[in-house]
Image: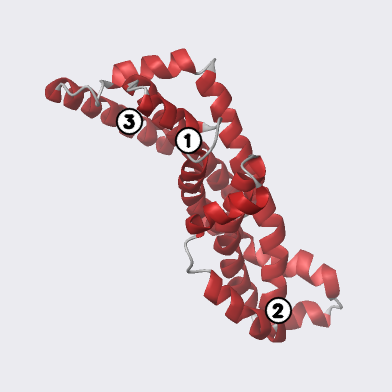
Amino acid sequence: MSKQLSSLTALLVLLVLWELMAKGLHLPALPPASQALAAFFKELPGPLGFNWLVSTYRILAGMFLATVSAVPLGLFLGRCPWADRLLGPFFSLIYPVPKVVLVPLIMVIVGLGDSAKILLITLVLFFQILLPVRDGARHLSPYLVDAVTALGVRGLAFYWHVVFPAVLPEVLTGLRVASGTAIAVLFFAETIASQEGLGYYLLDAWTRYAYPDLYAGVLAMSLLGFILYSLLEWLERRLCHWKYL
């Protein structure tokens, strides 16, 4: 409860500072927090809520696809040195490339719909999950491996009951760290040839000089990131409770 209270207090402090700064500067591009919140709750049942749901769907789909593809591959590479030696150099070359530069290429190949945005998010999250999972599986305690193999645990059972639980904290931590980056990439993708999503909503409000609506969109995108981060943190505490003992 203390953490929730601290977060609420920090939010209230930021809103008060925002309100005071806006009223002190008197800039059209910086409306008071009260106006932005009023626009947020006014638009939420309409266009803002719809675009928020579209962006949420794209983020969740990308996170799901990245997880189900990166985790098994990371486990395999971590426990099979020959496969890691074969494929590792390719991932090392691709990982540093900013995935946002692939937006035009992805849209040319996949199109301008949801598939392009989801694929971009999947690519961003894929490497954020793959590398920690691979390293976690690689550095699994040899004493633990010897003990379970001596009991006859091998094959898929070994991966499911031993390796996967050991690297689960890395999976959830990678998702938490990458969730903010994924939202930033989604915003960029939704501002290019898109007619829906929070990125489109923000760009549309900006071109109309509707600054309260613009800040309402910023609040909605911030809320999306906060919910995702909090949900992943909650899952980590529930599924990896031994880390917090």
Q: Position of residue 134 (x, y in %)?
A: 62, 72
Local packing at callout 2 (Cα closer than 10 Å; few below 14, some 14-19, many 20+) is: some
Three-letter code for the amino acid on which mark 3 is drawn: Thr
Three-letter code for the amino acid on which mark 2 is drawn: Arg
> How did the renderer colour the structure?
secondary structure
Frontmost residue, 107 versus 1: 107
In the rendered view, would you say 191 is above or below 22?
Answer: below
Residue annotated with mark 2: 79
Q: Position of residue 89 (x, y in %)?
A: 58, 81
Residue at 31% from the left image edge and 27% from the top image edge: 12
Three-letter code for the amino acid on which mark 1 is drawn: Gly
Residue annotated with mark 3: 9
Secondary structure at badge 3 equals helix
Local packing at callout 1 (Cα closer than 10 Å; few below 14, some 14-19, many 20+) is: many
- The residues bearing labels 1 and 2 have C-alpha atoms spaced at a distance of 40 Å
Residue at 34% from the left image edge and 31% from the top image edge: 11
Local packing at callout 3 (Cα closer than 10 Å; few below 14, some 14-19, many 20+) is: few
Secondary structure at badge 2 equals helix
